[in-house]
Structure formats: structure tokens, C-alpha cells
Image (cartoon, helix red, strand yellow):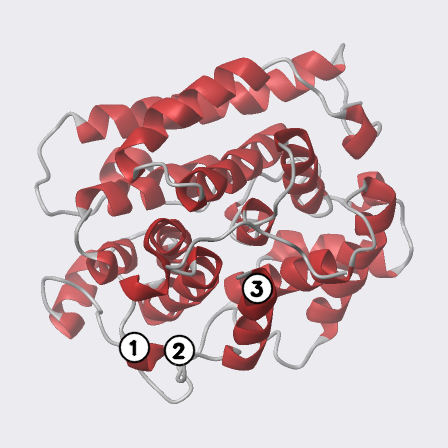
Amino acid sequence: MIATVIDSPPRRAAGSLFGLAYGDALGKPTEFLTVAEIVRRYGPTGPRELVGDPALVTDDTQMALAVAWALHDAPAYSPEAVEPLLRQRFVAWSVSPDNNRAPGMTCLRACAELALGTRWQAATVAGSKGCGANMRVTPVGLLDVDLDTLAGLAQLQAGLTHGHPTGLAASELTAYAVRLLRDGAAPAELPGLLTARAHEQRGVYRGDWLGDLWQRPGVSTPAEFIARGWDECLHALGRLDAALHRGDDGGDPCRHTGEGWIAEEALATALLCVLRHPDDPVGALARGATTAGDSDSIAALAGAFVGAAHGMAAWPAGWAARIEYADQLTALAGAAD
């Protein structure tokens, strides 16, 4: 079934999906460079132009497309309907010849187990909270579903590969941020709204979506398990708030909110890039790409947020025809807008 979302004339769903891919493409060549090396190559404002035709993306966009197609094809938004489709799409990605963009080892290890038919709660990498959990969750935030379903979907898609509670919580918050922006919230409101959500959900374990994922040595209850994830997200949001209360020194945002290799830091640092450049959408992506951390994931999430807030008008008109997977992004955006 076609995933139905609510959208306004700015085409917010398209802006978010394409923005994710644009940020990914801008951050792809800078991911393993120092800030000094990036500045020498691109100048003090970082990369602001797509390179190549097509401009290539990474596994961040590839896996976001996998999530989007699973949701597109789902007959219902329930764990029973969506989990097999996510499994199928993730496994197909893992063995694809296009999976040659330095994919994360957590995703590869989990997908190898999923391909064997292993129950997903056993296939997942239980200790991983890498940003692979939430770099791909944007399509969930664009669905017209209630917040409980949004939360369940966000955590399920994360849990198939990243079983750490912080990966689950950060994925829910990332999808919720996209939803808020799509619905008209101002970016500056997000830190407070996300912090409130984290406090509200701190003891909520979604057993209908996660099953017995919580059962780990040393964990007594489902609530204890999930609270750890929300607490780590609250810590990251606290760092974001502290950074926003300081003036922007123009340097690497990772120094304040983390390098983005883990899920809660990818969320916080992407938001910091957006909030540092409220009137310059491409500048927000460039700021994410000009970091010593996981530049492609940070810039991809920044693009998803900016695009959800401003729609396709945020982006240069010529980029849509040049980005890799433009046909899939167009098809999914057309179904959503």
C-alpha cells in the first residue's frame, strides 16, 4: 500500500527525502577527513555543490530507501506486516553490488543473521547504538500515523540491526523530529519538544513491537532496559542545549555534541547544524559535512530536518536530477506528497 502522509504545498516529504540524500552526498567525500583537510579542499564554508552526475550517496540513503520501500509495500503498519518487509529489504541491500560504500559492520552482521531466518531479536547486534539505527528512519517520520505507531515503527526498524536501547530511543526521536517539522514546528522548538518527549517515554517499553528484546544479563525489567536509552538521549539533548546557549565560533559542531558515530550524537549534532544555519539550508548541510565525525550521516539527518521544515524549495533546483537514486526518491516522494 502507498504510505500516506500529510503534506503542504512546499512538498515537505519530498524535501526531506531529497534533503537526506543531498546531505549524504555532500558528506560522503569528507567523512574520513579532518576539518582542516576539508577546509583546504572546499574552503571555510565546506562543500556546497553536488559533485558528479549522478552525485553518489552512501549506505545512509540506500538504507533509508530500504525502509521507505518496506513501508510503501506494507499492507498495514503493524509489526507482523512490516518486519518481514524490512528484513527482505535489508537483506537485499546487504548483498547488492551497490553495497560498496563502506557500510557499517553492525548492519552487515545483523543482515547476515536475518538472511538465515534468525529471529530478529537474536539477529540484532545487541550492544550497538551506532547511527545506522537512525540515519535511515526519516521515512517513518513522514507517515500519517499516530505517535504510538510512529514510535513502534521507528524502534522496530532500528532494532532489526541495532539492539541497544539508545539506538531505539534515538530513532524514535529522529522520526518524531521529522514529524514535528513536517507538521509546521519551527526548528528552534525542537530541543524542547524532543526533551519533553524523552521524559514522557522514559519508562515506556513497546513490547508489542519489540518482543523480548529487553532481556539481557543484568536487566531486571523492560522499563529499566529502555530507560537507559532515553537517559542517554537526554544527555545528548542537554549537550545540544548547552551548545546553543554559547555563541557559534564557526568550528566543528562535533566538539560540542559528539562526532555522530552513535545514534544520539548523530541526532544532536545534526540538529545543531540546522539551528546554526536557520536561513541557509545548504549551509546546514555543509556544516554537517565539515566535521571530524560521521560527516555523511550528520549532513544526511540535517538535510532530512531542513527539507521537512521547508520542502523542496530549500534546495537548488538542479540538484534533483543529479542525485543518485533520483528515480526512487521521486517515486517515493510522489506517493507521499
Crowding around mark 2 (Cα neighbors within 10 Å: few <14, some 14 to 19, many 20+) is: many
**Helix, strand or loop for disc 2:** loop
Describe the element under mark 3 as helix, strand or loop: loop
- For numbered disc 1, what is the local secondary structure? helix
Residue lying at 44% horizontally and 18% vertically, measured from the top left: 196
Give the residue pinned by disc 1: 317
The Cα atoms of the two marked residues, 3 and 1, are separated by 30 Å
For image coordinates 82% across by 41% down, the residue present is 79
Query: Are the residues flagged by discs 3 and 2 in contact, CB closer than 8 Å?
Result: no
Q: Which amino acid does the dot numbered 1 rest on?
A: Ala
Residue that badge 2 annotates:
320
Residue at left offset 64%, top offset 51%: 106
Left or right placement of residue 153 versus residue 279 in this view: right
Image x and y of residue 235, in percent: 40, 21
Q: Which residue is drawn at the image coordinates 81% and 48% (left, top)?
A: 76
Residue carrying label 3: 103
Q: CA distance from mark 3 to mark 2?
A: 24 Å
In this view of the protein, can residue 50 be seen by the observer? no
- In the rendered image of this protein, does residue 11 appear above or below residue 320? above
